[in-house]
Amino acid sequence: METALAMKGPFVRTLVIVLVAAGLGAYVFLVENKKPADTGEKKKEKVFALTKAKVKQLSLEPKAGEAVTLKKDGDKWRLVAPREAPADSNEVDTVLSALENLESDEVVTENAADLKQFGLDAPSNTVSVVQEGAPQPLKLLLGEKTPDSAGLYAKTADKPRVFTIAAYQESSLNKKPFELRDRDLLKVKRDAVKAVEVSGPGESYALERTDKGEWNFTRPLKTAAGRWSIDGILGTLESLKMDSVATEDVGKDLKKYGLDKPQRTVKLTLADGGYKILEIGGAAPGDKKYHAREAQSPLVAVIPGALVDDLAKGMKELRAKRLADVSSFDVEGIELVSEGKTTTLARTTTKDKDGLEQQNWKKTAPDKKDAARAKVEDALFKLTGLEVQEFVDKPQAPASYGLDAPAAKVTLKLTGGKPPVVLELGKKEAAYFSRRPGDDAVLKLDSAKVEEALKALKEL
């Protein structure tokens, strides 16, 4: 009995120690978690009390390079020094946003006796901002980088304090005049373009947009243009930016830039009756760059060669290569006339047990029955996917292509009140041809794919 009690003594003492330690640990945990977290980081201060919406003037004065001054004109910005020019409002906004959010990382000294040691006796850049209603402009002086290159010494003009800012901010505040000017050469929106005329070596052509948004060539012949191809060219023209400025005033030196006889001219007629003319001259220094200007403008720009390459592909690249530029989802009715027989189908809409709409197809002639939706959509996909193998721009009589008595005629009725698409397919020997309403050209098609599409339609 005494031995058992003696053995229990150390065990009890150990248990008590463990319980006390656990309680103390829980107390520390609860107390410490009630204290606010101390990350060791001080809250950063904004360098300026600046509201970019109130800024009406911005100046950048780099130690090396041209000083820049911009003034706000209404809701737009204008470059006034070193030369007058429209400014890129987005680029100006980037600079102002950087200033508005600029924070000091660390205060180096509250009262700098010697600015030279920080490179602030002759700042690498001085940024000045004039705010509406402010008596004095805000001015920021930028010096050298800190020894670890992570920061940049800086100070404001109104205080002796020297502090650091993140070194990456330097690129946001150090802008050359060209980087802040509006580099948009034509200032045109693609949706505003009503007609396009392109002239140059080899061929010239003209296009017009219809009221339905489709594009057609009007010269040298009437034929359909590819919607996405034309949209691509217009998109390139809309976003055309100057790589650099060759001269602000070409004067009588047009020949120097190959603009006395432009190698290519693009005229854009706008919906409001106005127009823009781009003249492309000779090659400029650099990899695939060209001199160009908006006609009548004294400024000659250097542009990248992408547009020149696209235009050099010519009219052939812009033609509508698909027989029917229509989505099968827009088709609500089909009529096939072939071998003296007419077959018609119509899209129907029903609701399932949950009230959700379902699209189906029904054959309405010569007999009436349900048509398998997958088979109809497959037939439409094959038909609308037919592409032109060859354009016959100076066709002979329709009989030469079997178009006097087409082997098949397909009419696609479209949703939304759009006019139907009519496809005539003529066969001469083993070759298939087609033509579009109002189109001067005859289109040669892939015979095997035409046979496949017609077979799929006839089996519906």
Image (cartoon, grey):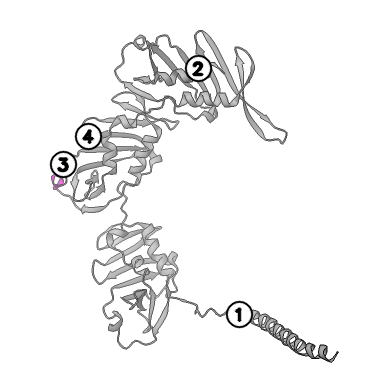
Residue 400, picture quadrant: top left
Q: Position of residue 143 (x, y in %)?
A: 31, 76
Q: Secondary structure at mark 1?
A: loop
| Identity, as a three-letter code, of the amino acid under mark 4 | Gly
Left or right: where 387 falls relative to 283: right
Q: Earlier in the sequence, mark 2 or mark 4?
A: 4
Q: Secondary structure at mark 2?
A: helix
Q: Quadrant of the N terminus?
A: bottom right
Q: Which mark is residue 455?
A: 2
Please name the residue shown 25% across and 72% down the image: 63
| Identity, as a three-letter code, of the amino acid under mark 3 | Asp
| Identity, as a three-letter code, of the amino acid under mark 1 | Pro
Relative to 254, residue 134 above or below: below
> Which of the two discs, 4 and 3, sits closer to the camera?
4
Please name the residue shown 34% across and 23% down the image: 222
Mark 4 lies on residue: 200
Q: Earlier in the sequence, mark 4 or mark 3?
A: 4
Mark 3 lies on residue: 260
